[in-house]
Image (cartoon, rainbow, N blue to C red):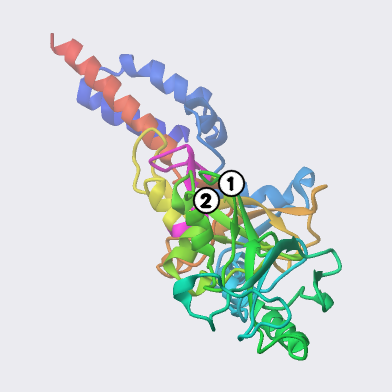
């Protein structure tokens, strides 16, 4: 380092015609002769590639995994991060009509052919004709916990788990020997069981009744007034019995197969998940950057950070030294050494991407970013020396100007 500075000083002295103004700069460079001290003096935005790679040699950092990102690693992590589709987890089966459940309120009406023998509901309308009958309508009643209703002359009837049409047929069969050609109509007065619940980041939490039409996931979301957050940052969680599954809302909208048919008891929760990563080092932006619930790749993350082409205050980037710092699931990869595990069961990992290799740009498109990742781009070797050169050149230019005055 001292030899390099001496050569520069000699050349600049010929330019200025005076070596004395440069003695101070030469002495300064001598005092910070070591490269590490040189970097410390001029400041550094983070560790170099060599310093990151030497972490495994530090006893304090033993167990931290350093993994080169290649096609196999990116493929394995992408498979782990892939969201399970609703069409695969729940299917899209259609129920055979509306099914009565315990707690529903239903009404029963019975018609008889004239002359009515059992209920005697003959019409008194003079214009209706002597042979016209009216329905005998019974008070609405709630299906009991045991799934039963009660009806005069035939007693208790099991109705839970059956469609209104099935109940109509059974009541008509029971009345066949008592009524004259009975016809039965079942009406659902209050649907208290075939409902879905919509909560979370929606305009209004709602309990939406299901009909024989067959409502779908987005129907329930529309009934709740839609989501309150941007669509690309919302995840829909569907709870059906003991099964819980989440999927990005944007995926459901783009893929009609994921807009599955709902079933009674489903709970839909709209979750606002502001996922983000932090970018540091030799990039255009050093900040926290949000990304969509459906996820982004490393290539997209670098683009949102302004890319690597930066010669500003952070210095020129080292395209071989693109790092992703992450607390990874223990079973995500086969670790080369015994991993260090946090109390939460996570493994601290440093992923390294070499974008000097053209293949790295293809691999970066498949490497998934995770929430709370730290993306770091190291500076190119000699970046701080170039900063020193620029400072020296500017100083000499000022001195030369003063000399000419």
Q: Is residue 45 left or right of residue 169?
A: left
SS of the residue under disc 2: loop
Q: Is residue 109 left or right of residue 201?
A: right
Foreground pick, 305 / 85: 85
Foreground pick, 336 / 224: 224
| N-terminal-most mark, 1 or 2 | 1
- Name the residue at the top extreme: 405
Marks 1 and 2: CB-CB under 8 Å? yes
The Cα–Cα distance between marks 1 and 2, rounded to whole angstroms, is 6 Å
Spot occupied by residue 58 in the image (x, y as percentages of width and height): 74, 46
Spot occupied by residue 338 in the image (x, y as percentages of width and height): 81, 61
Whether residue 104 is visible to the viewer of this picture, yes or no, is no
SS of the residue under disc 1: loop
In the rendered image, which quarter contains the C terminus? top left
Residue at x-position 34% and y-position 48%: 309
For residue 162, above or below residue 51: below
Spot occupied by residue 18 in the image (x, y as percentages of width and height): 25, 17
The magenta stretch spans residue 123: no
Residue picked out by circle 1: 205
Foreground pick, 276 / 89: 89
Residue at x-position 43% and y-position 35%: 384
Residue picked out by circle 2: 224
- Tell me where the magenta segment starts and ends, as one range: 275-299
Whether residue 136 is visible to the viewer of this picture, yes or no, is yes
Residue at x-position 56% and y-position 55%: 235
Foreground pick, 230 / 211: 211
Q: Using a 10 Å C-alpha cutoff, classify the residue at mark 2 as few (fewer than 14 neighbours), some (14 to 19) or many (20 or more).
A: many
Place residue 5 in its image quadrant: top left
């Amino acid at each position: 380092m001292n030899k390099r500075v001496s050569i520069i000083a000699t050349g600049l002295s010929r330019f200025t015609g005076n070596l004395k103004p440069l003695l101070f700069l030469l002495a300064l460079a001598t005092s910070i002769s070591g490269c590490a001290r040189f970097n410390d003096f001029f400041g550094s935005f983070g560790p170099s590639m060599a310093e990151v790679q030497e972490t495994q040699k530090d006893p304090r950092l033993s167990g931290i995994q350093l993994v080169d990102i290649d096609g196999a690693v990116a493929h394995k992590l992408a498979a782990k991060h892939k969201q399970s589709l609703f069409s695969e987890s729940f299917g899209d089966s259609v129920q055979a009509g509306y099914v009565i459940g315990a707690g529903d309120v239903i009404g029963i009406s019975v018609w008889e052919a004239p002359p009515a023998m059992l209920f005697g509901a003959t019409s008194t309308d003079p214009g209706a004709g002597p042979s016209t009958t009216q329905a005998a309508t019974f008070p609405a009643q709630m299906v009991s916990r045991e799934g039963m209703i009660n009806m005069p002359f035939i007693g208790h009837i099991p109705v839970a788990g059956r469609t209104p049409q099935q109940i109509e047929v059974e009541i008509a069969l029971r009345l066949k020997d008592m009524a004259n050609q009975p016809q039965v109509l079942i009406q659902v007065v209050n649907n208290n069981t075939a409902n879905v619940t919509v909560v979370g980041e929606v305009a209004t939490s709602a309990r939406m009744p299901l009909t024989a039409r067959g409502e779908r996931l987005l129907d329930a979301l529309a009934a709740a007034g839609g989501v309150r957050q941007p669509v690309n940052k919302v995840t829909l969680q569907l709870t059906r019995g003991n099964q819980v599954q989440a999927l990005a809302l944007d995926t459901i909208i783009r893929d009609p197969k994921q807009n599955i048919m709902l079933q009674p008891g489903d709970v839909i929760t709209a979750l606002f998940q502001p996922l983000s990563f932090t970018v540091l080092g030799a990039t255009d932006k050093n900040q926290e950057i949000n990304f969509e619930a459906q996820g982004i790749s490393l290539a997209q993350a670098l683009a949102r950070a302004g890319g690597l082409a930066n010669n500003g205050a952070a210095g020129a980037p080292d395209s071989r030294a693109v790092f992703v710092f992450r607390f990874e699931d223990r079973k995500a990869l086969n670790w080369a050494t015994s991993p260090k595990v946090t109390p939460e069961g996570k493994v601290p990992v440093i992923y390294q991407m070499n974008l000097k290799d053209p293949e790295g740009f293809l691999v970066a498109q498949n490497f998934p970013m995770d929430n709370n990742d730290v993306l770091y781009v190291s500076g190119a070797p000699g970046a701080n020396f170039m900063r020193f050169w620029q400072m020296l050149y500017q100083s000499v230019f000022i001195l030369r100007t003063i000399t000419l005055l």
